[in-house]
Amino acid sequence: MDFLKLIQSLDELLYEIMSWLVFYPVTLWRTLTRPLKMMDYSDAELGDATEKQYTDTLSPPLFLLLTLAIGHAIELWLVGQNALVGNRVGLSAFISDDSSLILLRTVTFSLFPLLLAARLLHARSRKLDRDTLRAPFYSQCYLAAPFALLSGLSENLIRYAQPWSEASGVLLYLFALLWFGTLQILWFRQHLKCGFWRAFGNASLAMVLCLGVIALTGTLFA
């Protein structure tokens, strides 16, 4: 009986993994073409029963994780292994393989959804707890995934160490920041029902805090 349950579990696992080949590009395309609608979609899906959530897309955290894994594969193909792997300086001593590097990047880019979601709740004077934080965090993961992919590509271009690639990498990162920041302003305007400058202030404060925490943490791995 236990063996049959194991086989059934393996069946479900195999189907789930293979379904990513369909639903990942669908989720990526919808996020790139209709980012704010995807954030609204995420909010709506959390209101459904657990087994009926995100049936035609990937869940936001899984989408972010897979995007970082794909970005890492691109990095290995384009410029090779990251210098953090195998480095024994500071906290980088804990980054011993590809899995730990992907985990680190997952935590790093999850800071954006976390802090932006917390900022929204603070601006709306809502209590911060596990339930209230979940919806904005999930919706922000949809935006964080393309931002992480573009940021990774820009880093790879800079590491490629060609004059054209370094300039392209800087421009790509600036574009990623502009794209991500603009959507944050629109998102805050929508949920706070406020003017441009209040939305801009909240988005900027959260973005600067995210970048500051990441930069400070990065010094521990140098």
Image (cartoon, rainbow, N blue to C red):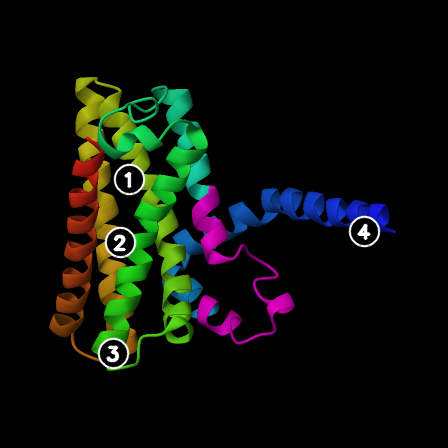
| Residue 54, horizontal then vertical, whole percent | 56, 62
Binning the other alpha carbons within 10 Å of mark 3 as few (below 14), some (14 to 19) or many (20 upward) gives some
**Mark 3–mark 1 distance (CA, rounded to whole Å):** 28 Å
Q: Which mark is residue 78?
A: none
Work out whether mark 4 precedes mark 1 in sequence or the reverse, and give the earlier one.
Answer: 4
Residue that badge 4 annotates: 5
Q: Give the number of the mark in front: 4 or 2.
A: 4
Range of residues picked out in magenta? 42-66
Residue 68 lies in what quarter of the image? top left
| Mark whose residue sits in front, 4 or 1 | 4
- The three-letter code of the residue at mark 2 reads Phe
- Residue at (29, 54) in percent of width and height: 111
Find residue 192 and name its label. 3
- Give the Cα separation between the discs numbered 2 and 3: 18 Å
Q: Are marks 2 and 3 in contact (CB under 8 Å)?
A: no
Comparing 184 with 69, the one in front is 69
Q: Quadrant of the C terminus?
A: top left
Amino acid at dot 3: Leu
The residue under the point 32% across, 24% down is 82
Q: Are marks 1 and 2 in contact (CB under 8 Å)?
A: no
Q: Amino acid at mark 1?
A: Ser
Q: Nearer the viewer, mark 3 or mark 4?
A: 4
Indicate left or right for 200 with 130 as reference.
left
The residue indicated by pointer 2 is 180
Viewer-side residue, 162 vs 124: 124
Locate residue 181, reporting x and y percent. 22, 56
Tell me which label, 3 or 1, sits earlier in the chain. Answer: 1
Vertical position of residue 56 compared to residue 71: above or below: below
